[in-house]
Amino acid sequence: MKKLDLPMLLLAVLVILMFVLVGIAIAFRNIWLVLLFIVLGFLFMGFGLSLKRKRK
């Protein structure tokens, strides 16, 4: 069984949380929070992909 990569798992959960928060912000009809969480989600995703590329 492979060992769990905890930092990457937490980063993935953080990205998922940002996009869940986009849905919540849409429900509250707050465009600024929608934009903020979309940008943060893509920033965290890009950061995770760059870390993965550096590891290989």
Image (tube, grey):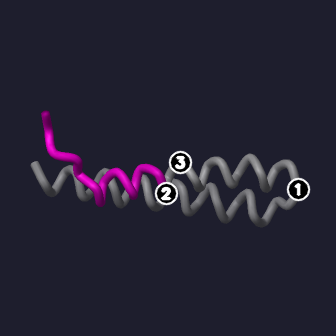
Q: In this view, does 13 lie above or below 30?
A: above
Q: What residue is shown with label 2?
A: 14
Q: What residue is shown with label 1?
A: 28
Would residue 22 appear left or right of 31 to someone viewing this image?
A: left
Give yes or no for contact between labels 2 and 3 (Cβ–Cβ under 8 Å). yes
Q: Position of residue 39 (x, y in %)?
A: 58, 60
- The magenta stretch spans which residues? 1-14
Q: Earlier in the sequence, mark 3 or mark 1?
A: 3
Q: Earlier in the sequence, mark 1 or mark 2?
A: 2
Q: What residue is shown with label 3?
A: 16
Please report the residue visible at 70 percent of the width from the left and 52 percent of the height from the top: 22
Q: Position of residue 20 (x, y in %)?
A: 65, 48
Q: Which of 54 and 1 is in front in this view?
A: 1
Secondary structure under the numbered disc 2 in the rendered image = helix
Q: Does the segment drawn in magenta span residue 10? A: yes
Q: What residue type is labelled 1?
A: Phe
Q: Which amino acid does label 3 sit on?
A: Ile
Q: In this view, does 39 lie above or below 2?
A: below
**Local crowd at mark 1 within 10 Å, few (<14), some, or many (≥20)?**
few
Q: Where is residue 55 in the image (x, y as percent from the top left)?
A: 13, 54
Q: Quadrant of the N terminus?
A: top left
**Local crowd at mark 2 within 10 Å, few (<14), some, or many (≥20)?**
some
- Residue extending farthest left: 56
Q: Does the segment drawn in magenta span residue 47? A: no
- Residue extending farthest top: 1
Q: In this view, does 35 lie above or below 20?
A: below
